[in-house]
Image (cartoon, coloured by chain):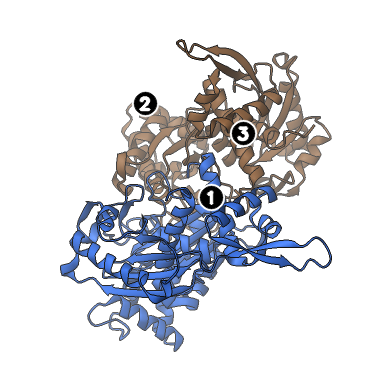
Chain colours: A brown, B blue
Amino acid sequence: MKRTSREIRTANRYRVLRQAIADSPVSRPRLAAATGLSTATVATLVGELAGLGLLVDAGYEDSGGGRPRGLVAVNPRGGTLVGVDVAETYVHAELFDLSWRALASSRRTLRPADLAPRRVVRVIAAAVRAVAEHRSAAGRRPLGVGISMPGVVDRTAGVSVVAPNWGWQDVPLLRLLAEHLPHQLFLDNPLHACLAAELWSGAARGRDDAVVVNLGTGVGAGLALGGELHRGAFNSAGEWGHTTLVLDGRACHCGRRGCVETYVGAPGIVRNLREMSPDSPLLSPDDDQTATIAALSRGCREGDPVAVKAVGESGAYLGAAVADLVNLLDPEIVVLSGWVAGQLGEPLLREVRAAVARQALRRPAGGAEIVLSPVAGASPVSLGAASFALEGVLAAPDRP
Amino acid sequence: MKRTSREIRTANRYRVLRQAIADSPVSRPRLAAATGLSTATVATLVGELAGLGLLVDAGYEDSGGGRPRGLVAVNPRGGTLVGVDVAETYVHAELFDLSWRALASSRRTLRPADLAPRRVVRVIAAAVRAVAEHRSAAGRRPLGVGISMPGVVDRTAGVSVVAPNWGWQDVPLLRLLAEHLPHQLFLDNPLHACLAAELWSGAARGRDDAVVVNLGTGVGAGLALGGELHRGAFNSAGEWGHTTLVLDGRACHCGRRGCVETYVGAPGIVRNLREMSPDSPLLSPDDDQTATIAALSRGCREGDPVAVKAVGESGAYLGAAVADLVNLLDPEIVVLSGWVAGQLGEPLLREVRAAVARQALRRPAGGAEIVLSPVAGASPVSLGAASFALEGVLAAPDRP
C-alpha cells in the first residue's frame, strides 16, 4: 500500500472506473461527488479512461434548462476480461465484459494425476482458450487474463511461491502460461480475488473501509482500507483464519491451536455438528464436507432443530471472531463471502449479526453493517481474478 | 481514511515534513527518494511548507563538482507545539519545537474532586499556560495545542463523547477550553497519540504498515496503514484490547470474556503473577498496579525467578495476540509502546519475539520486525498530542 504519486493516480483510476461502471451513463460532476475527487481530477481521469477505450461519450443529461452536462458510459465494445479460479479440485474460467456481465464460462476437473505444474498449466490454458475464443468474445479486444491461485503467490514475479496442497514451490506460473497464451497475464490469491470482486461489483464498492470474510474450507478476511486492498508487507495480509479464537483449543493444520478456521471453516462447522450430534444423518457418510454443508443448509430451511442449532453455534463462533475484526478495524461494512456463506446464507447471517451486536464495542449509528456477498455469477473468485487483469491494465496504461 | 484529492495532498505534506524533520538539512531529491513522491510533487510541497514558515533554505549540498543541490531544514524559529496527555489521575502538558525537542513540561494531579468537566478544563488550561508561557517559548510562534483524551472522542466536533471512568458524556471539551486559551485546539485519543508519536518521531516513520501496541492499564493497537493512521468508520479502530484471546476466559469490564486486555493490560499482568504466586512479595500490598509492574521490572533485572516467569507468561499471552495481528495485517513493524512496555522492556520484548516466531505464519525475510518504542521524552502521548496540532495546521494551511 505504498502511496507514490503514481500509485495514487492508479487508485483514482480504479475509483472512477468502478463508479462509472456502477452508474453508467453518468456525468463527470456526479462521478466527482461519488468518489470525493475534484472535478478537475475526474475530468482528467475520464479522459485517460476514454483514451484507453474503456469509457465513451454517451450524450447529454437533461439539465432542466441549465447548461447540458455530458455523460460518459462504459464502452460496450471496450474489451473482455478473463478470470480464472484455480482451486484444489477444479479450474474455472469465466469471460466478462466491462460491465461485469459473464459472457461464457468453462470448468475443468483437476484429477490427482493432473497436479504437476506443467499439467495444471495446460488445463488452465485450455479453460482460458475455451472462453476467450467463445463467439461472444468475437470482435472485442481481449484486455487480459487474471488468475487466482491458492497458497502464497508473488504477484509481481508471477510465481506460485507455495501451493501447500500440491507440494508446489516457486513455480513460475505466468512464465509457463505465456508459452500457451498470448494474453497479458496477472496473478494473485483467492482471498484478494474475493475482495476485489466486492470492490468492483459488490458490497464494498465506494466504501472506505470494508472487510470481506471468505468462508470456505479455509477462511480469511480480505481488508479494503481507504477504498483499496490492504496487501501488507509480504502480500499476505488477511490470514485471519489462523488468529486465535480459543487459546489451546482445537489443533489446526498450521501447527497452532484454537484458530478461527478450526471452528468456522467448512471442516470446523462439520465438527461443530458432529460434536453436538455424532450420529446426525446430516453428516455425510463419506466425510464429504460439501455434502454436509449442503445438508445443513437444507436442514435450516426445513426447520430441522439439529441443523438450526449447529448453524447457530457456528454463527456464534463466527460472530465472536467478526466482533474482534470490527473492534480492531472499525469498518463500515463486513461482507460474508465464499461458498460456505453462500450455502448457509440468512440463518448464518442472523447469528453473526446477533453475536456482533452483543459483543462488539458500541459505536454510533449501530456500528458496522454486516451483509452477505451480493456478487452474482458462478464464482466471485473468477470475477475478482478478472478484475486483477483490469487493474493491471489501469496500472500500466502505456504498456502495449 | 477517505482519500479525496485534498486529503492525499495533506497526507503528502505530512510525509515530506516528517522526512525533512528526520533528515534536516536535506535536498529535495533525497526527500523524493525517501517518500516515493515525484521530485515535482516534493518541490511543490517543500514550497508550501516554506510558505508556512516550517522549512527554510539551508545552503547547498557538496555535490562533488556537479550542479549544487539546495538544502532545506526545519525552521528552528518556525513555531512551538503543545501536547497534553489527559490521563485518569493527572494532566501532563509538554512544549515542543518543530524538531520534537521538549522545551518545557508541566504535570498536575487530578484529584477525585477535580473530575467535573469545568474543573478538568481549568487544570488543562493551567498546564497549557505553564508551558506556553515558559521562557523557552519566547519569540516563537505558537502553532497549536493538541489534547489526548481517554474514552471516545469526536475529533471533528471537539467533543469527549464518553469518558467512562469519569462518567462524562458529550462534553464539548474544545469549546470549554477556548474560553480559557487563545490557541488553535485539536483533540484525539491516547491510542492515536501513541501511533502519531511513532509516525512523527519513532519507529513507524517512513513505514507503510505499522502496528503500535499500546500497553497500559488498558491496551490497544494503533494501526498505520499506507503510512497514515487508520481511523475506521467511527474513529475507533484499534480497540484490540477487547478482542478475544481466550474464549470464555477471564471476565472483562467490557462485558465479554477472555479479552486480550485481561491478560496483558497492567491488571492482567498483576493477575498472571498472583495466580502463579499468590503470596509473592512482588505484589503491591495495597494493590497498586504501577508498583507491582515496577517490582516485576526490578525483579527481572535482578534475575528473580518468579518475576522472570510472570513476565514470561505475560509475554507469551502478548505474543499470541501479536501473532494474530501480524497474520491479519502483515505489517512491516510492530512497536511495543505504553508505560507497561517501557517498564518491562527487553524481557517482555524477548518473549513476544519468541512467541511470534513460533506462532505467526512464516513469511519471507523473517516477517515483521518487533521493537520497543524509541520515542524519547516524558510521554509519547504528549508528543503525539502535539503532532495532532501540527497535522491540523498542515491540513488547513490557509486558516488564519
Residue identifier under label 3: A13
Residue identifier under label 2: A301
x, y percentage for residue B165?
23, 61
Residue at 55%, 54% (x, y): give it. Answer: B51
Q: Residue furthest bottom?
A: B302
User: Label 3 near label 1: C-beta < 8 Å?
Assistant: no
Circle nearer the N terminus (3, 2): 3
Please tell me whether mark 1 or mark 3 is closer to you in this view. Answer: 1
x, y percentage for residue A145?
71, 31
Q: Provide the secondary structure element on which disc 1 rests.
A: helix
Q: In which quadrant of the rendered view does residue B265 lie? A: bottom left
x, y percentage for residue B41?
64, 48
Residue identifier under label 1: B11
Q: Crowdedness of circle 1 by 10 Å Cα count: few (<14), some, many (20+)?
A: some
**Chain at tag 2:** A
Is disc 1 in the same subunit as disc 3?
no
Q: Crowdedness of circle 2 by 10 Å Cα count: few (<14), some, many (20+)?
A: some
Gap in Å between the C-alphas at discs 3 and 2?
43 Å
**Chain at tag 3:** A
User: Label 1 near label 2: C-beta < 8 Å?
Assistant: no
Closer to the camera, A260 or A369?
Answer: A369
Is disc 2 in the same subunit as disc 1?
no
The kind of residue tagged 1 is Ala
Q: Is residue B29 left or right of residue A73?
A: right
Residue at 63%, 22% (x, y): give it. Answer: A98
